[in-house]
Image (cartoon, rainbow, N blue to C red):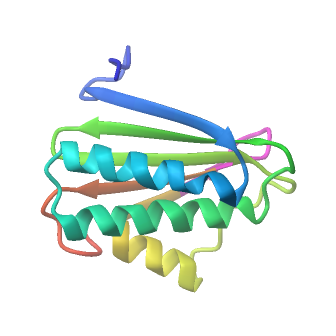
Amino acid sequence: MSQIDGEPGVKDFVEVRLPAAGAYLSVLRTATAGLAARLDFTLDEIEDLRIAVDEACAILLQQAVPGSILSCVFQLVGDSLRVTVSAPTTDGRAPERDTFAWTVLSALAGEVDSTVGSDNTVSISLHKKRGGSPGQP
């Protein structure tokens, strides 16, 4: 893990880049569990985050450019973990927030947001604080 220069309060980060295909998501689930365990998250919190990361990736993979790269950045900040998954998409459409999938993300991860870059890259950010109740950052 490395220090992120220029970002106050961000202690450690890990970036994982892999093919934008469902067959590789187990790598992200494992990384999520390992990093959450490092922060002493409970087993339930770890499982919630694993499911949330999987769901965020599933949302992105539906519109990812074939053959592209899925990027996942994990930021460990104090007693919380911020996970941002990003992929170039065919139409640059942000995920709809009134869907069941978005409701699941919010319930499992606490704070959830999405952004669209000028290059049609869509990002979904999850922020989970250790000890936070479900649906709370």
Q: Is residue 126 visible?
A: yes
**Highlighted range, magenta:** 114-122
Q: Position of residue 33 (x, y in %)?
A: 33, 53
Q: Is residue 120 magenta?
A: yes
**Vertical side of 59 occupied by 84: above or below:** above
Position of 128 with respect to 131 (left or right) is right
Q: Is residue 77 magenta?
A: no
Quadrant of residue 11 within the rendered picture:
top left
Residue lying at 42% horizontally and 56% vertically, measured from the top left: 126
Figure quadrant of the C terminus: bottom left
Q: Position of residue 39 (x, y in %)?
A: 18, 45
Residue lying at 28% horizontally and 23% vertically, measured from the top left: 8
**37 or 120: which is nearer to us?**
37
Position of 103 with respect to 44 (left or right) is right
Residue lying at 38% horizontally and 50% vertically, measured from the top left: 32
Q: Is residue 137 visible?
A: no
Quadrant of residue 109 within the rendered picture:
bottom left
Position of 54 with respect to 14 (left or right) is right
Figure quadrant of the N terminus: top left
Q: Position of residue 69 (x, y in %)?
A: 72, 40
**59 or 41: which is nearer to us?**
41
**2 or 127: which is nearer to us?**
2
Position of 38 with respect to 62 (left or right) is left
Q: Position of residue 38 (x, y in %)?
A: 20, 42
Residue lying at 45% horizontally and 79% vertically, measured from the top left: 104
**How many marks on residues?**
0
**Vertical side of 106 occupied by 130: above or below:** above
